[in-house]
Image (cartoon, rainbow, N blue to C red):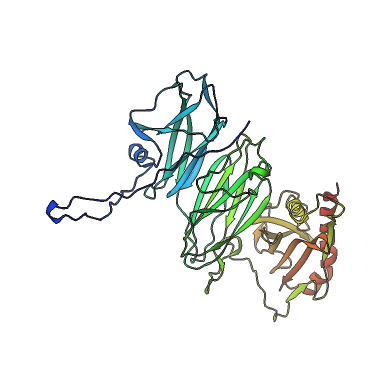
Amino acid sequence: MKFQSTILILAILSLAILSCAPEEENEADTRKLVNQPIDPSSQPNELNKELIIYGDLVPGNMPSASNPDQIKITVSISSALITNDNFLFLPFAFDSNDQLKGIYIEVEGAQEHWDAPVELVDPSDNSFAVAIGIPNFIQKGDFVVSYSIYDQNNNISEKKSINVSIVDSENRCGSGQSFPRVTGEDGITVKTYDMGDYPGTVNISYYMYNQKDRMDIRYGGEWVASTSPVLLQDGQAPPFKTCNEASPNDGFVSYGGSFSIPYDPQISRQISIYVSGCLEGGTVWYFDVNCPTGNNPNPPGAMVCDNGQIQDSFDPGSENYHIYPKEGEELNTIICDPSVDPNCSVNEVFDTMLKQSNFISPTADTSPVEDCKLTWVEILTPFNPVISKINYFENSVTNYTLANQKDKFGIERSHLLHPGKVTRTVELIDGKVVVSTQGEGTGWAASINTFFSKTVWTNVDKDLQEYWNQ
């Protein structure tokens, strides 16, 4: 099936100007109307009127289906999550015996509907994306949008519906808090973040599981990053694909990655992230967003994984301080050679390392590595708790030791070498892809930890190496 998205031209949201001054003064009242907040869950009429749609608002409900065998919506999305002051892109694919002419749209429960024209760039296109503006005075809540399409002979399709959730924009930068992870499935998710007062670099990491998904990022009124090799242009909507047709050429991927966005509050304080899940495949994905770094004179002390117990830095003056490998030494293992193996690359090996927890630590756990996942590792006993933090920017995973964690038997356990951390990094050294390991901490068994480090981590590397060579 051919999917080429075309956007319905967006209506411009204008601020009404009052002009009720007496004629003799001959001056316009330039005060702006203040829009009253609208609850989308309980005010369908008001919400329906305030949506920004290029078309006409018509009294009554949208027309019923007429000759639906002549025109059909074949693929659609069932859900969307979006912050206000943004655009909801409503994509669909269709089959029609005649030229597509327009689309009817209404908020469920409203007493009016929209009649919007459709103008395909290419008459042979069989997909389309309607852009629906959500004004900034629409409050948090849920509603349902119904729609149907019609052709030039007034044949009308059966209607489709999409469940829409309006969520708050996130504003945590400067508070010392981190943004919560965003997860999703089929459908469209649009999240907006206020990045605060200080310029710097905003780091965004993502992971798309087996089914492919697409991410696009908008900042300062422009598309600035994408999993697609080609950025969207102004007026373009993110495309949509079924899971069996999605490909990296269209920006749909099934691996992890990251973006670094230069941020300047003088340009805009808001960054919007669009995730388009592939359709009809049960896709799952997540992404993480960090506050700007690099130019903040007083950066807040954000906790790793929102866990106040985790220690990320250690005092070199401590009597138990240790770090390995020592300066001038190496602790790494070659996983593959790109000159011999065409599939060998840093990204591919890193993605493989995340498939099983025993590739990042000495554990019997073979489930996938997840950000901030608690894992029990074997250091003399199999009851040593760690939390794993994934860094997609550096292709690394850091395991932080924990104390006083209850195991599956309800017994409280502490890591034998707490406090400490170990970072596992996939990198290219001398033309070969290797996994490097570095440990640091102030746990009581410093000399034992350092002495056995090479044996322990080489064995972990061998598990990854054998898996790669299967």
Q: Nearer the viewer, residue 5 or 270?
A: 5
Residue occupying image coordinates x 29% and y 52%: 34
Left or right? Give the position of 168 relative to 237.
left
At 23% from the left edge and 50% from the top edge, which residue is drawn?
18
Q: In the visual, does 289 lie left or right of 346? A: left
Q: How many marks?
A: 0
From the top left corner, tell me how far across and down residue 109 is, in percent. Answer: 37, 32
On the image, the x and y values in percent for residue 130 come to 48, 38
Q: Is residue 456 left or right of residue 152?
A: right
Q: Can you say whether 253 is above or below 345 in the image? A: above
**Which residue sits furthest right?**
340
Rendered image quadrant of residue 384: bottom right
Residue 67 in the image: above or below residue 454: above
| Screen quadrant of the N terminus | top right
Q: For this view, does 442 lie left or right of residue 52? A: right
Where's residue 17, x and y in %?
Answer: 27, 51
- The residue lying at 28 percent from left, 54 percent from top is 32
Please tell me in which quadrant of the rendered image residue 260 appears.
bottom right
Q: Position of residue 87 (x, y in %)?
A: 46, 45
Name the residue rendered at 53%, 71% in the picture: 296
* The one of 42 and 237 positioned closer to us in this rendering: 237
Residue 76 seen from this side: no
